[in-house]
């Protein structure tokens, strides 16, 4: 029995799907200890938007380490944090005319969500939060309460309350009707509905199955929040940082969120980091009211600042839109060729997906792809959706090669079924 | 207005206490961007047990980066994780005849606590958890529920239930009586008390005011947990990893916790990492039941594995005991000299404290110390306790220098009062 | 200041609307201490289905008292309880081929609802209960959680959780869509919806505004409950006991509830009594598991048994249908004459209503009616709905007289507006 | 199978202990349908303080019925309510210099407790309520949360939160220590304890095992409540109305409760009625904020007003003290004779008890007593305590006869053991 089986908890998951011990990685490629090569269509679930070991960040990290830069600083001020903040202001906020305060929360997405929910409840003095079917916001109890997945929720061991659950855009045909009914209910003191502290929404539900919300529906959610003085929170943890072809996934949609949760890609290099963006009028925290040990991860500031260089011009984002379009076309063609009308293709930018409608089929495709040297993840109910999410920086040839492997795996599965 | 004021949320805290922008650091010294030198008696609240930028870890990190090692891997297997697990097994578990499974949770202490509470509730099918006055376990809602501090709790915005709160050892003279009364109550079906899923305790309450539990009381807590099939959880996040003079703070006390929460020092270098140690019979997770993006922080595995080298022999721990003794003596002398019977000294190993009984006094001492080049933290109710917690590796001369500064600050404050 | 103002709590309500001190009453008439005569269109909110002081019941009560019958018996067996149970079996259950066990709960509707919710949760091992907009089920915390009205809910002082709130039939056009979306969600492990212990519904929401559910929608609710092994509970507290023209309000609708909550009219004479009807397979209580002091109100058993005599044949129920039809026609005519398109008439059997759309208008009409000798209640959001609910036994002439007064009050208000 | 088995829910309890069908009753005697005579040492769990069918009340009820008095009036004003209120003011409040507002809640003890908790939470804006081991306050979810018994609590099916549970006077030696520890904790912002809305206490825990609190301890509870602006609530439902030898059980103890819950004996005749007494400054209800159908039980007002006549002078209360003393002496003698040092006698006034320490022993004694014509109840954990609680008006000879039967049953059980 190897040490992973002997010592690592039964909770381990991905290592069961990808039975290899990984050693090296470069951009969209991972290599196991035997030198086998894998194309990475998973990208750390959105962490590795700029690939593995991007040279500029790697160099900056080595320089920082070599110079005895402060690695860990709680929430003291450091030169590395200043550099990150300045880059974020200059490259991201100012050009988009956005005015957000930045909270460095504990360095995980779930912590950013916990901070957002606390703040929304504090600002409004309300308790309920509206969340949607198939939402994924994290594993700690506050974030878990707004997450939809029953396996995760049941592990809480305590009731997960304070949440009004609504159908997401298109869910059971009720996305719009239910918003309308909630509007009526919130105006009606006999409805049993309390005004919520916030609406929290993903523009694309990544873990939930790559469900893409329309701008129209998102604007309706935002409008309802505004009407009732609820905060409008976008969880951009998985699909922010350029993934959809804009820096924030909600750009160009007429949206103006009050709070934005970010993590994963924000650290650039795969180092843990998370932030909550807060409109200044809602930055009503007292000092230290939400705290945490690892808020000052300076290596992540160093890499994260360099990652922002990708957004100094439109080059990367244009590539994302181009490659995303090609990914979509290829998937649509595969669906048409092998899907027998049972498959669906969904996505925005470089998060694309093929919904097989059957978790066992998707799992089998994942295994076939792994055997052929492709790492791909599944998501959605019972894992029925294949999520195609390579680094934004993947080379065209490698992308095509990965899509060819995926096509072969899907074709093989379809033939055997 | 500088960028920190302009862009960073009002929640920022330590940067207000230490108005400097830090740039470099080495072992127990930090330097601000103007070259000012500060002795670090804070050590990242227990993160930097081995000081800033320890050379062996720094070198290992640079080597790993240079070789394009996998930085981020979710919970896939990697060579870096294997190295860490092997070192943890060989250096820590085996010599102590401990048999724990290791869960890599999201890389923060609060996440380790959330995982522990979920697991205890799952294993027992119970909901309540016993926690103690002045406990600090984290900021996310599950961990916050067992935390004692009202400022933090009030920020939840939702009720924090599922907790039975008991007096800690010595609290209001009720530590023992209340354990006895709970024992009666748990044997009595009319008491209104449900059998708890777990008891969660810190052997030394660091944030709570450096309250040191006796072995006798801790054994009584453990015994009560055993009697009622509750899990006994030690939160060793701040005082584990050698801080008290043994690797785990609960060694040599006749304790055998079912779950152990670790974070802070486990990553060695200040990189975010957290683990939950689980007795094999309680490792009842299903795969992926508690998940998170940043469970595979390989740079932390690399540094963390090297950090374990400190525990291959007793050299460091002996130094901790020696230096801890000296710290205690010096503080006791300062108390005797200036305390007018109002101050108290408490601690174990290299977490020592001077309780001034007055948050304003402690805050003033902190400011005076900072002006003289010493970073020190406060804790306990209203921050009345000065917590002395340098890196375990602090040089004797620097330790003495820091204690001299602290003495001067305390003397000055006492004189002005 | 009279004793009511001096000694009775500010919580008193109806005495403010009807500023009189009542002394005597007979069938549909009440008399104040000055001998003023009032027609009762309120009937104790459904308690006095058989009018005030119905002679047969009055005589039976006097006989029972005179003979030193047991008045109070907790849940011991008594001859009076046997008489009631036999009558209920013979007159109500057997002819309708219904097989229910009878639980005598504490003698209030809210207690019957509390018992129903406890039992549904016990039987299913689930926590959530589906309740509807505008529902009214009671004031104690369990029943209050499923009630919709914000004024009542806000008085709880604690969160009211464990409830999934859905639109009632017709509410914001979402009654059907939302049932459909819940069906999808309950079949989908990522929806965030747990399978509920029960669906609790009123066939006519009396306090909620005399909202009448269609048989089709009620059957859809029942079908959804059945699909997911949830109990289907009908709260027939206000509209049972003959009010709608059948004994139970859900007869002749293809419904087969698992639990039925009854109170108000069941005691016949206005004496406190409540029962929960339970399908035998769900009668899983252990002895004494839900208890209460006043479960053995033998005077109510005596009167309640005599009240069941009304249902030995179809005479009363036919009259209810006839008078209900006339009430509806008269109200429709008044609406047409004075409503300017803003009013609505709704109801079933002898619970009819005129929705003025404006709480101030309805309150003014109530005052005008009172001045003319008619007691009428309001309900619905802001009390905008006039609820017409006389005793089922009201004489035709008195009914017409009351409707004339109501017409005059409405006409007057419409003219002044 | 008789109709009780066939139709009454399995929840029925007392009818299993006393397998008879009761028909008539007079003062302290009950008769079954076969004419068997039983002495009533149970008195409807405190309802029948004035015995069964007390002639003056019976006559008043018959007169009221005959005159077509209003039986049911919601919370409208009636002449019967005025008579009750005046008597309560003149006979009870004024002579004791008490100034309480009277809220007629739904006519059950649990409803009075629900109202008290709501009001305390509303007045203070706080959520937690302090309740004690072995407390019994009712079955609806709000009251159940403060009740101690696990069988009842587990039937809730939902978490019962918002309660701080403390040891009652003498419980595990912790009654005083725990009050002291709570005092410290409430003054300490890191204790994890929120200031409570109220402390709710029974002066004698009747259902909990006839546990008698000392005046000293009760004053300490009241003092702690006052210190922290919490309301001090006495639940006098079972031991008020003269049971302990004063009208309220808390008289002559230096207590001044803010809210007093009353039910059971207040209706005099066994008719359902409950009130909440409220200090005027806390009567902060808005009209109708806590409501209920059966608040206007005029027959209970009629009988309850006559019951107050017993307190126009000290005659009854003197008898209660005398008979209570004799009961206590007799029980003490029986204990001495047969208890072998395992039994305990506890009580105040005419609620006395013999704690056998063993639920099976107590159940066997109950059966033996029943066979000999004595109705007696059990209480406390596992029902180990025999509660001796006859009507206050029991004739001396009947009391002695009952005590003789009890002695014989205890002696027989002791001999067989």
Image (cartoon, coloured by chain):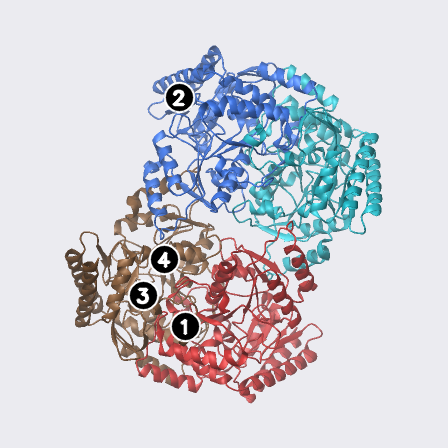
Chain colours: A blue, B cyan, C brown, D red
Residue ID for mark 3 = C45
Residue under disc 3 on the same chain as residue under disc 2: no
Residue ID for mark 4 = C136
Viewer-nearest of discs 3 and 2: 3
Residue ID for mark 2 = A414
Could you say where residue B264 lies in the image, as x and y percent from the top left?
Answer: 67, 34
The residue positioned 18% from the left and 51% from the top of the image is C341
Could you say where residue D122 lies in the image, as x and y percent from the top left?
Answer: 49, 59
**Labelled pair 3, 2 in contact (Cβ < 8 Å):** no
Quote the CA–CA distance across marks 3 and 2: 65 Å
Horizontal relation, residue D66 to residue A113: left or right: left
Callout 4 crowding tier (Cα within 10 Å): few <14, some 14–19, many ≥20: many
Asked if residue B57 is positioned above or below residue C166 in the image, the reply reads: above
Horizontal relation, residue B303 to residue A295: left or right: right
N-terminal of the pair, mark 3 or mark 4, is 3
Identify which residue, A68 or C331, lies in the foreground: A68
Could you say where residue B356 lies in the image, as x and y percent from the top left?
Answer: 75, 47
Identify which residue, D116 or A158, lies in the foreground: D116
**Labelled pair 1, 3 in contact (Cβ < 8 Å):** no
Quote the CA–CA distance across marks 1 and 3: 24 Å
Mark number displayed over residue B382: none
Residue A395 seen anywhere in this rendered image of the structure: yes
Instruction: Write down the chain letter for disc 3.
Output: C
Residue under disc 1 on the same chain as residue under disc 4: yes
**Image quarter of residue C282:** bottom left
Q: Residue furthest front?
A: B416
Quote the CA–CA distance across marks 3 and 4: 12 Å
- The local secondary structure at tag 4 comes to loop
Quote the CA–CA distance across marks 2 and 1: 81 Å
């Amino acid at each position: 029995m190897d040490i992973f089986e002997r010592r690592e908890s039964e909770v381990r998951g991905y290592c069961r799907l990808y039975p290899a011990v990984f050693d090296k990685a470069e951009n969209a490629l991972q290599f196991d200890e035997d030198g086998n090569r894998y194309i990475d269509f998973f990208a750390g679930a959105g962490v590795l938007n700029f690939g593995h070991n991007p040279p500029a960040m790697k160099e900056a990290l080595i320089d920082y380490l070599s110079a005895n830069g402060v690695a860990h600083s709680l929430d003291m001020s450091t030169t590395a944090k200043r550099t990150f903040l300045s880059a974020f202001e200059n490259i991201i906020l100012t050009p988009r005319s956005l005015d957000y305060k930045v909270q460095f929360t504990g360095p995980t997405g779930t912590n950013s969500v916990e901070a957002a929910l606390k703040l929304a409840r504090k600002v409004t003095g309300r308790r309920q939060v509206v969340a949607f079917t198939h939402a994924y916001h994290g594993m700690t109890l506050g974030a878990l309460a707004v997450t939809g997945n029953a396996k995760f929720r049941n592990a809480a061991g305590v009731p997960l309350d304070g949440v009004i659950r609504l159908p997401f855009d298109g869910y059971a045909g009720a996305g719009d009707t239910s918003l309308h009914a909630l509007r009526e209910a919130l105006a009606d003191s006999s409805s049993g509905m309390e005004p919520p502290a916030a609406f929290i929404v993903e523009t694309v539900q990544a873990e939930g199955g790559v469900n893409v919300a329309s701008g129209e529906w998102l604007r309706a959610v935002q409008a309802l929040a505004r009407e009732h003085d609820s905060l409008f929170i976008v969880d951009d943890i998985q699909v922010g940082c350029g993934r959809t072809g804009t820096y924030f996934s909600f750009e160009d949609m007429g949206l103006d969120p009050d709070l934005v949760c970010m993590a994963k890609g924000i650290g650039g290099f795969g180092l843990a980091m998370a932030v909550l963006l807060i409109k200044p009028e809602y930055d009503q925290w007292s000092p230290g009211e939400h705290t945490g040990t690892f808020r000052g991860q300076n290596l992540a500031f160093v890499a994260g600042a360099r990652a922002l260089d990708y957004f100094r011009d439109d080059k990367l984002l244009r590539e994302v839109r181009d490659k995303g379009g090609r990914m979509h076309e290829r998937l649509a063609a595969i669906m048409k060729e092998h899907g027998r009308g049972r498959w669906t293709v969904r996505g925005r930018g470089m998060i694309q997906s093929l919904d097989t409608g059957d978790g066992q089929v998707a799992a089998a495709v994942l295994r076939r792809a792994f055997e052929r040297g492709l790492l791909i993840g599944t998501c959605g109910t019972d894992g029925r959706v294949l999520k195609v999410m390579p680094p934004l920086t993947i080379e065209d040839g490698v992308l095509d090669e990965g899509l060819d492997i995926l096509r072969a795996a899907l074709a093989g599965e379809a033939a055997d079924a």
